[in-house]
Image: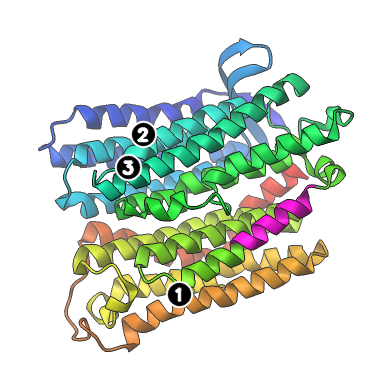
Amino acid sequence: MNVVTSSLPLWAVIIPILGAIIINRTPEDWVRVRNLVAVFTAIANFLVVASILPMILGGSLVEFTLVRFVPGLELFFRIDPLGIIFAFTASLLWIFAVIYSIGYMSRQPAQGRFFTFFIISMSATMGVAFSGNLFTMYIFFEYLTLCTYPLVVHSQTEEATKSGIKYIAYCFGGGGLILFALIILQGLAHNSSFVPGGILSATMGEPRVLLIVIFFMLILGFGTKGAIMPLHSWLPAAMVAPAPVSALLHAVAVVKSGIFGMIRVLYFVYGPDMLVNLNVINYLAVLVCFTIIAASILALRQNVFKLRLAYSTIGQLGYITLGALMLTPIGLLGGVIHIINHALMKIVLFFCAGAVIRVTGKTKIDELKGVGKRMPLTMLSFAIAGLGLIGILPINGYISKMYLLTGALQADRTIFVFVLLLSSILNSMYYLPIIVNAFFREGEFSKPKDLEAPLTMLAPIVVLALMCVFFGLFAHKTTIPMVEYVVNYVF
């Protein structure tokens, strides 16, 4: 592939930092100025990422070296098809998240602090997406933890403080595993740059046990943020954060960074051939399958709205990893498409949950009988996204499941087919009762009355729900061709 040297990836990291600095220096009562800066920063960042997309789809790689410490150890950016898809999805959804946050946080204290860290988290996410080697990814991975911690503890209650301690302990613990593995890898390969097929192909003679240990250290390190069980408990605890932060954690930034890191390890550090040689895939597959089913069962038991969505996220993230573990083009295609589709659907669900909580003050599912009659647009959007995650046509979620099921059959992984189908049944069991409660049960909210959230919250919800349908109807012209570039690049 043609390599283009450009500072554009650096600007994608710097622009949110500049925006956050301006927000931080803006007086607390200058609400409109702060809000405009936040929105324009998110838009500017998206435009930078969007300007890179045609180059990558045209067959080029974009590279930029910021600092070279010693040969093989450098802060190095490389934008490839996988990185641009993650960055494009995250930067686009961040615009909607900022607009939604303006409405949601309008009655909350310390809005300046909130928006400062909400915007700067975008910088860390772009750094993860555009990292050209494991060292750079580790730096931005930890940077993301530091940026999102103040958002988790924003309310500064005792519960928020405890959740924040758990969040940072888990994430830094995972980061420690990555750092230790990175040090050993640097000694083996003398270079941690991501290469399709893996950087370790030349070290097949190294001790097999050592390579297996390093593999699981990296997978568990990234898997902590990816909420792979049993390293998941920080995620439900983090639901104490405001709804826009929950959406950020679950749909766009933190958990997706963990899954993104796992894909980098599977295909760009080790590579399919070495993974087969080391015979580690089956062990990881057992862990992922357990995560998908156990998280879905735990979601069934949750009556708190956001907690049910949190456990759903844990299970849905397993889909992406499962697709990558098939080590086939179709499996990877399904997994990467689900990065996009899950991001769209899950951000809608959390936005809807936040709107319901903001308007009604209710946090439990059994308290929401008839709420669809009071908030019809919000709950209709929730129904679209929920049905999409179940896999109902024509919403975009069915595309992911179709490719994942096909990939599992082609890879002769019948157990994966069983897990995916069982998970879909469990999905329907914990999403459909919310929809039925909202529209078909009599309760406190049964009498029709307009109680929709403010327009700054409602508009992102409706637009994103419509996008879920659009990308379901026109996946063959949008997401599928984009993700095919990833598959062609990797294989």
At horizontal 52% and vertical 47% (from top left) the residue drawn is 256
Q: Which residue is at a point 50% across and 78% down the rendered structure image? A: 429
Residue position for label 2: 120
Instruction: Report which quarter residue 455 is drawn in.
Output: bottom left
- Check the image and report above or below for 91 versus 364: above
Mark 3 or 2, closer to the camera: 3
Whether residue 150 can be seen here? yes
Residue 394 visible in the shown view: no
Which residue appears farthest toward the top when viewing the image? 70
Looking at the figure, which quarter contains the C terminus? top right
Residue found 47% across the figure and 65% down from its top: 468
Q: CA distance from mark 1 to mark 3?
A: 27 Å
Q: Secondary structure at mark 1?
A: helix
Tell me the residue that label 3 is attached to: 151
Residue mark closest to the camera, 2 vs 1:
1
Q: Residue at x 45, y 68 (%)?
A: 385
Query: Front-most of 402 and 141?
Result: 141
Going from N to C along the chain, the mark reached first, 1 or 3, is: 3
Q: Amino acid at mark 3?
A: Leu
Q: Which residues are magenta?
A: 280-291
* Residue 349 higher or lower than 43, as above or below: below
